[in-house]
Image: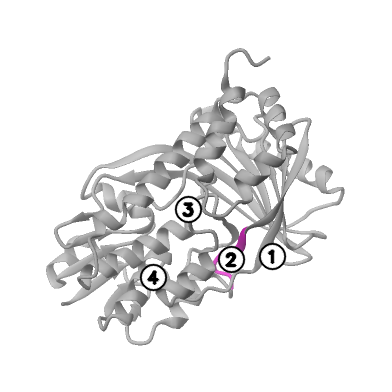
Amino acid sequence: MKIAIIGAGLAGLSCALTLEKHGQTADIFEQRKEVGFGYTIAELMTPILHAPIDDAVQYFSENHDIHLKPTYNIQKIHVHSENESAYVEGNIGFINMRGSHEDAYEKQLAEQLVHSKIHMDSHVTYNEIAKEYTHVVLATGDPQATQQIQPYEVAFKSCFAGAIVRGNFVRNEVHTWFNNYFAPKGMGYLLPHSKTEATLVIVYPQYEQEWVDKRSHFWEEMLAQAAQTLDQELIIEEEFTITDYMVGRCNYPRIGNTFFAGNCFGGITPFLGFGQTGSILSGIYAAQDICGLGDYETLCKPLYKDYEDSLVLRRAIEGLSNHQLDLVTKSLHNSMVEKIVTQPNMSVLKGLSHMLKPFTSKEVK
């Protein structure tokens, strides 16, 4: 077999690592000059998105011999709406770095490769590669690459604004904001990288052009709200913006000997917008199929299920007014809600969707 992987992100590198563990190697083609995308950002890896995997770092290490070192484990998530604040405590997941950071997951995975070669700054096309290799794994991180080959169902496009900020932070505590005034039908979040540095982001769907046009205004409001919530000045170090970021899924995980992995498959979960676990799993599953150790479409069924459950929960949250978001936030003080979020091996997405039903009722005032 002659295997090509297009993209040296989480999915592509996880695929290459798994292939190596079963005696195969791959040529990895990356259009950038280093692995990972071109800016630094922290992300959240949480079992909320992929039950029953309640500790993804342990799971990948013990079951797939893939070893990741997150930045911090998370013990508390603060949730803020317009007029309410609450928090949930427990082993909620991990903060990890992505992109150009020296400890980014992409760089950690690349360092574990032994035989497979990463061809940096390689602007290859799928058609070129498909002629030379028996198997191709498409893992560019760009769903548009999938759309050139098969249908890709776009749930929505997102708009991001964010920055690396300096301040004083509790390293294993995360803050989230749900407020339609500056993150319409979306959210803001702060993830610390250290005691003095954090990622602050707002992300929301591009349902209205006005929301895209007001991105700078929304970002200023988010920054002011975060400073007020944390009762400190936040100093911007590095800003970034993204528009037209597609969240969706492909129709077919595999067509012939072409495998679609990571964002080309649909690794982003619509609820919170993170996709590390799903992307890594898709890469592993593609490699297992290539090595005759499973059927990719069958292996991916739980990922499709997670995606659909996450989309249902997102649609429910999108329908909430600020008043209803206040009621939901206030309900987080309930011990049953905390159990839903922190209990291992539960379908957390389904539990949260069920919890939101009373708040999405038209009778709620």
Q: Which portion, as a residue range, is magenta?
A: 93-101
Residue at mark 4: 14
- The kind of secondary structure element at disc 2 is strand
Residue drawn 35% across the image and 47% down it: 304
* Rendered residue at 66%/36% (across/down): 178
The percent coordinates of residue 324 (x first, y second) are 66, 24
Residue matched to label 1: 193
Q: Name the quadrant of the C terminus.
A: top right
Q: Badge 3: few (under 14), some or many (20 or more) residues near its Cα, within 10 Å?
A: many
Whole-Å distance between the Cαs marked 2 and 4? 16 Å
Name the residue beneath numbered marker 2: 97
> Residue 101 lies in what quarter of the image?
bottom right
Q: Quadrant of the N terminus?
A: bottom left
Pointer 3 residue: 50
Comparing labels 1 and 4, the label whose residue is closer to the camera = 4
Quick one: 123 or 296, which is closer to the camera? 296
Query: Compared with residue 164, is residue 28 higher up or lower down, i.e. above or below?
Result: below
In primary-sequence order, the first of circles 1 and 4 is: 4
Whether tag 2 and tag 1 are in contact, CB under 8 A, the answer is yes
Colour scheme shown: one colour
Q: Nearer the viewer, mark 3 or mark 2?
A: 3
Amino acid carrying label 3: it is His
| Dominant SS type (magenta) | strand
